[in-house]
Amino acid sequence: MTRVLSVASEAYPLIKTGGLADVVGALPAALAPHGVEMTTLLPGYPALAAVSKGAKMVHRYADLFGAPARVLATRIGEYPLLVLDAPKLFARGGGPYGDASGADWDDNWRRFAALARVGADLASGVVAGHDYDILHAHDWQAAMAPAFLRWAPGPGAPARSVVTIHNIAFQGRYGADIFPELGLPEAAFAMDGVEYYGGVGYLKAGLEAADAITTVSPTYAAEIRRAEFGMGLQGLIATRAARVTGIVNGIDPAVWNPASDPALPSRYTARAIGRRRVNKRAVEKAFGLDVGDGPLFTVISRLTAQKGMDVLAAVLDDLVAMGGRLALLGSGDAALERAFLDAAERHPGRVGVRIGYDEPVSHLLQGGADAILIPSRFEPCGLTQLYGLAYGCVPVVARTGGLSDTVIDANEAAIAAGVATGIQHDGVAPETVLHALSRAIALFAVPERWATLQRNGMRADFSWGESGRRYAQLYANLMGTP
């Protein structure tokens, strides 16, 4: 049995702001069939109060980056969970990373250094009875754990380490003034250590220190070696290329399954795809859209330039003129929120917008809309297109990152071969997005072709089976076992 400690800032269903939580929450079950026992370490946010109640304390810190703290052992479903109970650091209103207004907490460097320090302690013998073969850190919030493990480990043999980059755009960069507070030796403040452009880089430090690096799709693993995608870290990624692996995320069929999803008024399978019509009526009602059989597009996204939402907002009038409708669920940049709300005012009954996020509504949109729009400028993996495929909500995506790896474009050859699952477009500009939309509308006008796209997507396997096997193999390779 391989024992892995997964360190992350969020995990579904306990705390979620995005796809990171879905991945961290799904990994323990994905790895269990491969002889891997994964324990997840999370911060003790208020959202974890219920699961922490009655948990067993396994370690205490009198002073963890200026705060008393305890490590509590409990379970998340069938799988082990450790909670870093440090109220001064994590018991706050707002979200995991910022206050109710959306502004980042000014002590995030301290909060996530504490999480990483505890991860490294657990992975190097500080806590009796908690021994791990592998430390697996996710994104910048946990990436300092391999750095602590390398430059300031505990008394035991340190575990091998993995850092997964879910989005290299978020790096955790802070001024050099925090370095003395981290408890690292002076030698760690170097170009091949935690130093980054004169300050401290959390993700950069983890990438330097880790024994292996993964990204969440093969295409993204290649893209981040280039300046336009590497966000300043492309040189480091290139020098460590032999240790970089792209493993596509999976989705949990227990959560995302149109045949059993409680959020859908009408459940269905690939053989009974006509039942989606009931869900389409429900989407129209929920978003104040005119009832109709024409193409209904959806967006479920952060409203940011990375996601291409500025371009989509600019072509909404054209989409409506072509006969399309849109139901959007998301939040983000205030100007983009306003742009979509303005479009809804210009096109009542044709464009419906909900600012915010609602998990059941996101399921309804996947189960009732005809197509999901994902015009991202970069997308490490993406999960919404996988949900769309599973639900027969045809993805219309930019050809980048995991979108490129998971959606088969409905060109004539792919249609003739019976393998197409969606529509891809090159680049994110008004003309390329409009061309993709016009292709989608033309395909939708031929019901048998559209239904084939839907069924192909629904029959594809995007469960965690293969991805779980690849992670287990990575761990085995690091441990030198077959």
Image (tube, grey):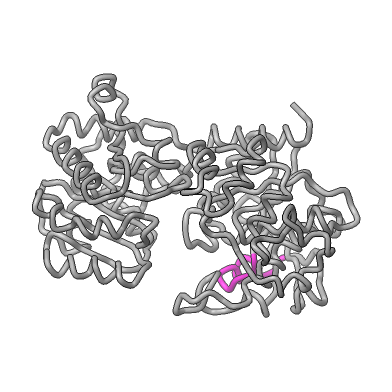
Segment tinted magenta in the rendering: 43-55
Q: Looking at the image, which residue is at 60% across and 33% down?
A: 470
At which x and y percent is residue 330? 34, 63
At which x and y percent is residue 211? 73, 43
Q: In which quadrant will I find the N terminus?
A: top right
Among all residues in the image, which is located at the extreme top?
417
In the displayed structure image, the side of residue 443 where residue 52 appears, left or right:
right
Q: Nearer the viewer, residue 172 or 254?
A: 172
- The part of the image, by quadrant, that contains residue 57 is bottom right
In the displayed structure image, the side of residue 90 where residue 181 appears, left or right:
right
**Residue 48 within the segment the image draws in magenta:** yes
At which x and y percent is residue 339? 24, 68
Q: Nearer the viewer, residue 109 or 368?
A: 109
Q: Looking at the image, which residue is at 39% across and 31% down?
A: 460
Q: In which quadrant will I find the C terminus?
A: top right
In the displayed structure image, the side of residue 138 where residue 464 appears, left or right:
left
At which x and y percent is residue 385? 37, 44
How many labels were placed on the picture?
Answer: 0
Q: Is residue 212 above or below residue 13?
A: above
Q: Looking at the image, which residue is at 83% across and 53% down?
A: 124
Q: Looking at the image, which residue is at 81% across and 64% down?
A: 184
